[in-house]
Amino acid sequence: MTLQGTNTYLIGSGPRKLLIDTGEINNNEYLSLLQSILKANDSYIAEIIVTHWHPDHVGGVPDICKMLADQSASQPTISKFPRTKAPEFSLGGIPYNFIEDNHVFHTNGATLRAHHTPGHSEDHLILYLEEENAVFSGDTVLGEGTTVMEDLFLYMKSLQTILDLNPQIIYPGHGPLVEDPITFVKNYIQHRKHRETQIFNYLKENSPKSFNLVEIRTQIYKDLNKSLYKAAEKNTVLHLQKLEKENVVESLNENGSQKWRYLIKSTL
């Protein structure tokens, strides 16, 4: 569980609702609350929009669909961006509706535009609520702390996507609302750039020598508790992979050991 759990959002001013994310499987307390809200407002879920494939965001889909079926309610459409590198999270036979970048969802009082924002996961999306100039950020931006990611190169581009939207508020997938989103996201970016600059400068200043992961981590994360070594090394690899994609450093194999060095650009 991340922070206090997964935030889900019911969208729409009329009876037809859109649900953003579903939480994890077997969350009976959540299902009971969702059912009571729908009943109190005489509303129904027309579509579930999944920000990404992780079980704490999509895992509750089958339980919600079963709850609705038990009430003889119509089944919602389950929409998300497709995964390309791995199979989709199984919904036990419930089909996905795969969408494309800039897909627009409509319901009473709400227009949501989906933006593909990979980095945390390859299929991640955020949703821009036009009526409020607000972003539902999934796990690209959390209400507290920083998120984990698969690809830092793509993640930084996704943060820029949020900045370009210039929202007044962010509704995150975990944690409290972000009420000063531009400053908050810029701090995310600055934190990552600070660490990246340290790695870049170390490799450049010691060029053309190459270094393995432990050697780089030792120089960048000084006086670090041993219990945090693996986390620091994982973070360092993400930065090195980003710098590789930007043709700033190169990876090489030296006697079975992966090393990195500053990529000296040709002047020819």
Image: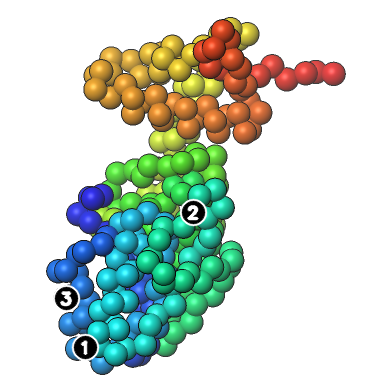
Circles 2 and 3, Cβ within 8 Å, touching? The answer is no
- Tell which residue pokes out farthest to the front in this image: 93
Q: CA distance from mark 2 to mark 1?
A: 35 Å
For disc 1, the marked residue is 39
Q: Quadrant of the C terminus?
A: top right
For disc 3, the marked residue is 32
Does residue 179 lie above or below 260 as drawn?
Answer: below
| Residue type indicated by callout 2 | Pro
Identity of the residue drawn at 50% across and 77% down = 105
Q: Is residue 109 visible?
A: no
In the picture, measured across the screen, residue 179 lies left or right of residue 96, that is left
Does residue 77 lie above or below 200 as drawn?
Answer: below
For marks 2 and 3 on the same chain, the one whose residue lies earlier in the sequence: 3
Percent x, y of residue 98: 54, 68
Q: CA distance from mark 3 to mark 1?
A: 11 Å
- Tell which residue pokes out farthest to the right in this image: 268
For disc 2, the marked residue is 87
Percent x, y of residue 170: 37, 61
Percent x, y of residue 131: 44, 77
| Residue type indicated by callout 1 | Lys
Identity of the residue drawn at 58% across and 10% down = 254
For marks 2 and 1 on the same chain, the one whose residue lies earlier in the sequence: 1
Nearer to us: label 2 or label 3: 2
Q: In terms of image quadrants, where is residue 234?
A: top left
| Residue type indicated by callout 3 | Ser
